[in-house]
Image: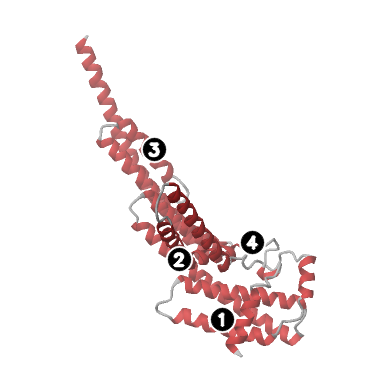
Amino acid sequence: MGNNSADQFFSRSHRAHSGAGDVSNGQSRARMPSSMGYLLIALFLAMAVFFLLWWMLVTGGDEAPWLPAGLAASVVLLVALSAREVVMRRAWTKYLLENGIQDRSKSRSSSSSQRSRSQKKGFSASLYSAALRAIQKQSSAADSSSNSTPEIHFEVAQLCHDYLASAEEAMRSGSLGSEKGIAMRASQARVRELHKHHLLTWARGHSLTLTREAQQKARTSDKIETANKALECIDSALRVYSDESELHESRAAILEFVASVKVAHWVELAERSAFKGHNRRAIDRYRDALFYLNQQDVKDEVRIAGTERIEREIEKLRSRLHDDGLKRQKLEDEKN
């Protein structure tokens, strides 16, 4: 009964997300990501590429237009299929974290209560027990595996989210007796702990991977773009667990990294301008560096040390400008 019951539960849980309580924000849901929809879109794009290229080749007088058109369409389809897992995972990440667990104090609308009463039938305590065992098994595997990735922890968090959504629906429907209701609340508490653990593990691991990737990028724009992805990951988890200090610390570290990248970028531009003798432009770029350095994202000791260094460079450049001005004035006086 274990695996089959768990499969039945998780299949139904996707259709029975609650409208309030611990698993809803009381607002209209976004459409859930569909793998079938993705495949249909990919097939449509491949066909569009085929017919467009075929028409262009026929117009150009190609004798076998279907061959390159079919090859191009096949490439589009293969690329779409190879990217399907990544695209769907990101879609589920966005969906679940935007529609994740919220506080019980959120409003419970009368329409959602009516939907709950209409779905009293079909809830089985045995299904929830089997689902809980499946979640605990996958949770233990994710924690004990040496090759565990952030994505594995997110998958467990997703299962917890689905469990809590359907369990809350069952509790509000009144289909469970008092004894089973007590047991269900205990199971919900356990699953909430697992959800928090695995979601925070995912956010920590995924953001750390992206931050390291950002540090290895060569271009400043690529560094900032990748770091912003890490920041989005942390912000997604903060929307669910806004009081988690570890998330706030990680967010502050990423913001400081982004600020340091911007400061280093403008300092490098200023140094290049100074090397070429463009002293006024160098001063302007040092001022841009000071702007990013004095943001709240930078630690005080780093900001003070960096500001002192940049101001010394600006004073040197101003001194050069003053000396250059005196030299030009002297030359003009000699000509006159």
State the residue position of label 1. 135
Q: Earlier in the sequence, mark 1 or mark 2?
A: 1
Residue 30 numbered tag: 4
Q: From what the image shows, is residue 22 above or below residue 8?
A: above
Q: Which residue is mark 2?
A: 206
Q: Is residue 85 at all visible to an observer of this figure? A: yes
Mark 2 nearby-residue class (10 Å; few <14, some 14–19, many ≥20): some
Kind of residue indicated by mark 1: Ile
Q: Earlier in the sequence, mark 4 or mark 3?
A: 4
What SS does tag 2 mark?
helix
How far is the residue under mark 1 from the one under mark 2? 21 Å
Residue 240 at least partly seen: no
Question: Residue 325 location in percent, x, y?
Answer: 27, 22
**Would residue 85 be found to the left or right of residue 302 on screen?**
right
Give me the C-alpha separation between circle 4 and circle 3.
Answer: 44 Å
Q: Residue at x 42, y 56 (%)?
A: 226
Q: Amino acid at mark 4?
A: Ala
